[in-house]
Image (cartoon, rainbow, N blue to C red):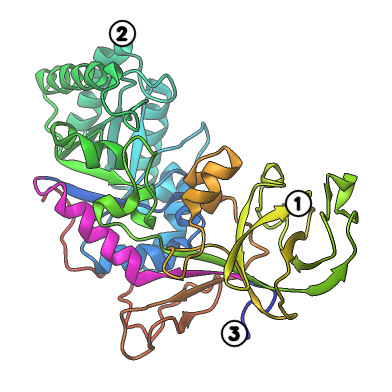
Amino acid sequence: MSETGKRARAVVDLAAVRANVRALADRAPGAALMAVVKADAYGHGAVPCARAARRAGAPWLGTALPEEALALRAAGDTGRLLSWLWTPGGPWQEAVAADIDVSVSALWALREVVAGARAAGRPARVHLKIDTGLGRSGCAPQDWPELVRAAREAEVAGDVVVAGLWSHYACADEPGHPSIDAQTSVFRQACARAEDAGLRPEVRHHANTAALLTRPDTHFDLVRAGIGLYGISPSPEVGQAADFGLRPAMTLEASLASVKHLPGGHGISYGHTYLTPGPTTVALVPLGYADGVPRHASACGPVRVAGKWRTIAGRVAMDQFVVDLGGDTAREGDRAVLFGPGDEGEPTAEDWARAAGTIGYEVVTRISGRVPRVHIDSADPATGAGSPTAATGQDSADPATGEAPAGGGDAAPGRS
């Protein structure tokens, strides 16, 4: 393990991110691709992953929070960029000034973005969102005519440009679910109503990773790739990541902090929920729920140590957990791998999701800031396979990788 992350580290392969962008784009040849880098790129590092996605040809980036989008602009991104989770009093003026597309789901948001556009001295690029059935954000269908009418008036006044119409699926990760067709129908009707009101958006978008992979009829002009970008399947029902040519980008690993022999019947961790079945060797892995290892993975989380899969023995603590090595041996400093791409027989994030009763999204996104992110480029001959190209959290471009500044990709913004 390198000097960065002697205790533990999350290694993110930017070559995998780029390959995943291309694989996903190939499955939606008639649409542009948005690389979703919200939540620090699902825990992988927003700016390095955004740069990798741009380099692979993604003409759009997407974030939930406006602060996330503004951070990408501050890091040098200049391409098309959408931010969608807004609350009253948000940084509308700053977003408009930074040429960030914003989502509008209600009249209050339209009023605030118009005020922000006037303060910024330029029209705002907005994407009107309709709730086609997910029941979260988005304009209710009965309120849609009023919203599109008001948006058209703001567009005629020169305050906004309606650049997009969009929505989000509830059950696209359950292929064949009747809600997919129902939501698609509502969306088509909403787009027709908006066009009847005089709106001519650049892009219409509804498909997330699951719909991108399984429902070509939902691609419209733009598809939003989230979890697939990081090489994780949206759900077992959709299929395994490898079925679609996707490669997991993150490997979570740690150095063993302690190895010792214990007699049979010895309790392990809080509550002694695990007792050693006989004389054995146990190893201490210095990661816990403060690092994002779920406590409910106690007694079931898989880890590769000393060449074999092990299961967490006893409870996960705040900073550490134990594995029982049985008759095998290990030394302090040896590598423990919680998950990775599976190349060396280690568990994957999807294995962790199954073991812990959650989803792959949560497994990678919850890895906390205590764990350094080390970005590598396994495809770059200047660095060599597996060598670090950027230390954790540092967003400057690394000359060894040749990563282009964010926004410097080959693809032009807008509809492809």
Q: Which residue is mark 3?
A: 2
Residue 277 makes an appearance in the image: yes
Q: Is residue 29 magenta?
A: yes
Look at the numbered disc 3 and give the secondary structure of its residue: loop
Q: If you read the primary sequence from the N terminus, does the residue marked by circle 2 or circle 1 appear first?
A: 2
The magenta region covers: 9-30
Residue 259 image point, x, y percent: 80, 74
Q: Residue placed at 34% from the left, 21% from the top? A: 131
Please tell me whether residue 81 is drawn above or below residue 160 in the rendered image: below
Please tell me whether residue 415 is drawn above or below residue 333 in the rendered image: above
- Under mark 3, the amino acid is Ser
Disc 2/disc 1 C-alpha distance (Å):
49 Å
Q: Residue placed at 28% from the left, 15% from the top? A: 144
The reply to whether dot 3 and dot 2 touch (C-beta < 8 Å) is no
Q: Residue placed at 52% from the left, 42% from the top? A: 354
Question: Label for residue 316?
Answer: 1
Kindly give the residue lying farthest to the bottom in the view shown.
Answer: 382
Look at the numbered disc 1 and give the secondary structure of its residue: loop
Across the whole image, how many numbered discs are drawn on residues?
3
- Camera-nearest residue between 52 and 315: 315
The reply to whether dot 1 and dot 3 touch (C-beta < 8 Å) is no
Residue 333 image point, x, y percent: 70, 81
Q: Which residue is mark 2?
A: 142
- Under mark 2, the amino acid is Gln
